[in-house]
Image (spheres, rainbow, N blue to C red):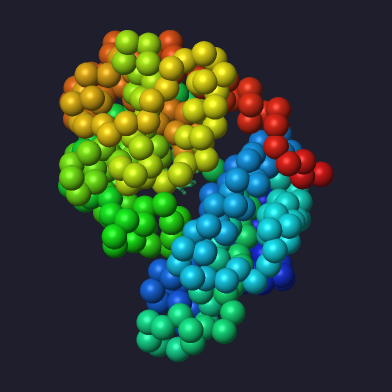
Amino acid sequence: MSDAPLQILIDGEFFPEGEAKVSVFDHGLLYGDGVFEGIRFYNDRVFRLEQHIDRIFDSAKAIHLEIPATREELSEMVISTIRKNDLHDGYVRLIITRGVGGLGLSPYRCEKASIIVIASTISLYPEEKYEKGLILSTCATRRPTHDSLSPAVKSLNYLSNVMAKVEAIASGAEEGVMLNTEGYVAECTGDNIFIVKEGIIYTPTVASGSLYGITRRVVIELALEAGYELKEVQMTRYDLYTADELFLTGTAAEVVPVAEYDKRVIGEGEPGPVTKKLIAAFRELVESTGTPIY
Ligand code: PXG
C-alpha cells in the first residue's frame, strides 16, 4: 500500500480520505439509521462478495431502506474502490445511510440513501493470538432481542456492542461474550462463537441473538466437509467453560482460538486440533476463492 490518501467512494464519486465527508443532517449520523457490511479481500479476490451483498440487501429490507443501486452495481462499487486504491489484501466497509433529511426521526424525509465504500487494510489481532488464543469475558450488556431491533440486521446501531466491548476490556479480556435476555450465549461483540466437545462442534442458533455471520457459515461448510458433526443449539456459559475447544469467527477476526473465558482455562489452554484444522482450511479457502478484482 502506498502513502497516498485513500480514495473513498461516496454516491458514485471518489474523494481523498480527508475530503470524504457526510452531511451532519444524514440520518446515519443523527439516528444510526443505516446498514453496513465488513468485507475482506485476499490475494486480489473478494471473499464471499455475493453473500455480503445479499446480506446488506436483507438488512436494508428489514429496516425499510431502499438501496439506490442494483446488486450488480453495488458489487461493482466494492471492486472499483479496491482497484482505485490499488489494494490486494484488505478490508472494505460498505455503508448505506438513510441519507440527508431534516431533524426528526421519520426516515421518509430523507430523499435518497447514500452509498459509501471505504477500502483499506485491517489487522484485528496479532498473529500471536492465532497461536496462543484470546482471553474472553462475559459482558453485562445483553444482545437486543428480535422484538426490539433484530440482531440479524447489521445496522449502524452498534452502541450495545461498543458498550459490551468496553466491559470486556475493563475486565482485562480481549473480546466479550454477549448473552441474550434469557441468559443464553448469543455471540461476541463482533464475532460468532463455536465450541468443540468430545469431537462434536456446536454453535449457538441464530435465534439465540446472533448475526447470520458469513464466516460462521463458511466454517460450518468447512467443518461438514471435513466430516465433523455440527449442531446449532441453545448454549450456556457452562457449555463454554467446559468446552474442549472454543473459537470465534468473523470477517475481521477470521477464525481465532480462545484460551481463557471468565478466568476458566479452555481445554488445554491452547488451540486444540479441531480449531487448528479449521484455521488452516479457512486460510486456504480465502487465498484461493472469491470474486476477482483485477
Ligand atoms: N456478530 C457481530 C455482532 C458482528 O458484527 C459477526 C458476528 C461476524 O460476522 P461475519 O459475517 O463478519 O462473519 C460480526 C461482524 C469491525 C468488524 O470493524 C466487525 C465485524 C466484521 C468486520 C469488521 O470490528 N463484525
192 versus 17 height, above or below: above
Residue furthest to the right in view is: 294
- The percent position of residue 69, horizontal first and vertical second, equals 68, 67
Quadrant in the picture for the N terminus? top right
User: Residue at image x 76%, y 51%?
Assistant: 83
In the visual, does 142 lie left or right of 125?
left
- The percent position of residue 156, horizontal first and vertical second, equals 43, 62
Q: Quadrant of residue 232?
A: top left
195 versus 147 height, above or below: above
In depth, the one of 104 and 15 nearer the eye is 104
Q: Quadrant of residue 134?
A: top left
Marker count (numbered): 0
Q: Quadrant of ligand 1?
A: top left
257 versus 32 height, above or below: above
Whether residue 69 is visible to the viewer of this picture, yes or no, is yes
User: Residue at image x 29%, y 62%?
Assistant: 148
- The percent position of residue 261, horizontal first and vertical second, equals 24, 28
In the visual, does 189 lie left or right of 249?
left
User: Residue at image x 62%, y 53%?
Assistant: 53
- The percent position of residue 145, horizontal first and vertical second, equals 28, 54
User: Residue at image x 26%, y 32%?
Assistant: 235
Whether residue 91 is visible to the viewer of this picture, yes or no, is no
In the visual, does 190 lie left or right of 100?
left
Q: Quadrant of residue 146?
A: bottom left
Quadrant in the picture for the C terminus? top right
